[in-house]
Image (spheres, grey):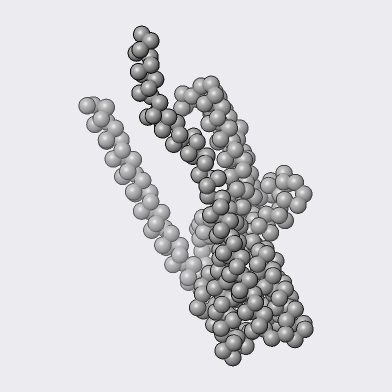
């Protein structure tokens, strides 16, 4: 009882201290934000001038910059460019996204040795034998390949979304063009009606055209940002229609039918893969329990008969 009361008092004391510290930090943050909004405000104290800078810029940014520099030095040639392309394909093309990824990559790689030390020397989970090796190997694998696997997953999800949205977008685009709208006006109407990653790419392409780039260059840039075979086929068809003077409505109608066939084939392919994927959990999870239920009583009867 004394230990319980002492633990409760300690928890209450820690909570009160944390509340006071967080409250003061919040008040100081509000004051700093108010001071930043005042034009021409001057602070004589150097420390107060430095505290006016956000905490992320004062503490986090230098650490991230150092980790990014380490990541650029330790990564092989071409790795950073490959990561930058994947960020564009995933729709994460921010200014500092690649630098943050490299910093996280360095952190996860630096945690491999501490994990090995904790698992083999301290062993907090009390594991031994093959189970310890399996758990340690799994943790090391997650730390070593986790960031790249996450980025590849983001790329695959966005490309799948582009493949699934393209037929619907082309249908609406075809109807708009056949109704009498121009290609760019039809794109504007489609972007407003069908939100998503593909509409964002079309909006960026239109922005580049209106900023002065040619339609062919803007569409080729969009195709490189998407890296999807269906989008590449659509871009090439539109460029050929512009080059040879073919009606865009006919080209869009043909492309729409073709994309719907490809989407149906993709769904059929996934349906054909489902039985093969279901075989693994059935073999390792369902069949053993089924064998125990079916064969277990017979084995018990045979054992009692031999006794």
47 or 28: which is nearer to us? Answer: 28
Examine the image and state in which quarter residue 189 appears.
bottom right
Image height of 214 relative to 62, above or below: below
Query: In the rendered view, would you say 306 is above or below 78?
Result: above
Q: Residue, x 62% and y 43% (percent of image)?
A: 145
Residue 261 is drawn in which quadrant?
bottom right
Q: Quadrant of residue 110?
A: top right
- Relative image position of residue 56 (x, y in whole percent): 53, 55
The image quadrant where one finds the N terminus is top left
* Residue lying furthest left: 1
Q: Is residue 305 left or right of residue 227?
A: left
Q: Is residue 131 visible?
A: yes
Quadrant containing the C terminus is: top left
Toward the viewer: 110 or 237? 237
Where residue 82 sits in the image (x, y, percent)?
Answer: 71, 54
Relative to 73, does residue 141 appear above or below in the rendering?
Answer: above
Residue at image location 50% in from the left, 36% down from the top: 283
Q: Is residue 201 left or right of residue 127?
A: right
Name, please, the residue furthest toward the bottom.
180
Left or right of residue 172: residue 106: right
Can you see residue 157? no
User: In this picture, is 140 found above or below 51?
Assistant: above
- Give the image location of residue 188, x and y in percent: 57, 82
Q: How many marks?
A: 0
Identity of the residue drawn at 23% across and 26% down: 2
The spot of residue 134 in percent (x, y) is: 55, 30
- Residue at the image position 42 percent from the left and 58 percent from the top: 28
């Amino acid at each position: 009882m004394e230990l319980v009361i002492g633990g409760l008092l300690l928890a209450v004391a820690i909570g009160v201290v944390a509340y006071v510290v967080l409250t003061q930090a919040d008040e100081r943050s509000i004051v700093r934000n108010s001071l930043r909004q005042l034009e021409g405000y001057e602070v004589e104290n150097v420390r107060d001038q430095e505290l006016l800078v956000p905490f992320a810029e004062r503490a986090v940014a230098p650490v991230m910059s150092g980790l990014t520099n380490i990541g650029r030095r330790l990564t092989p040639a071409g790795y950073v460019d490959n990561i930058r392309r994947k960020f564009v394909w995933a729709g994460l093309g921010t200014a500092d996204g690649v630098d943050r990824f490299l910093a996280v990559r360095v952190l996860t790689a630096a945690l491999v040795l501490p994990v090995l030390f904790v698992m083999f020397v301290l062993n907090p989970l009390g594991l031994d034998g093959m189970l310890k090796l399996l758990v340690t190997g799994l943790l090391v694998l997650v730390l070593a390949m986790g960031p790249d696997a996450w980025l590849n997953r983001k790329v695959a999800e966005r490309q799948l979304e582009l493949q699934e949205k393209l037929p619907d977008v082309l249908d609406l685009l075809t109807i708009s063009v056949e109704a009498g709208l121009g290609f760019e006006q039809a794109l504007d109407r489609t972007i407003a009606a069908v939100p998503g990653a593909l509409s964002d790419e079309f909006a960026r392409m239109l922005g580049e055209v209106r900023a002065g780039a040619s339609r062919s260059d803007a569409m080729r840039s969009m195709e490189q940002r998407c890296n999807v075979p269906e989008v590449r086929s659509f871009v090439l068809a539109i460029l050929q229609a512009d080059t040879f003077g073919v009606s865009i409505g006919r080209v869009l109608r043909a492309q729409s039918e073709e994309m719907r066939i490809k989407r149906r084939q993709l769904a059929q392919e996934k349906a054909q893969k489902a039985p093969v994927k279901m075989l693994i959990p059935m073999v390792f999870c369902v069949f053993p329990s089924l064998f125990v239920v079916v064969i277990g009583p017979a084995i018990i009867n045979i054992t009692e008969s031999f006794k």
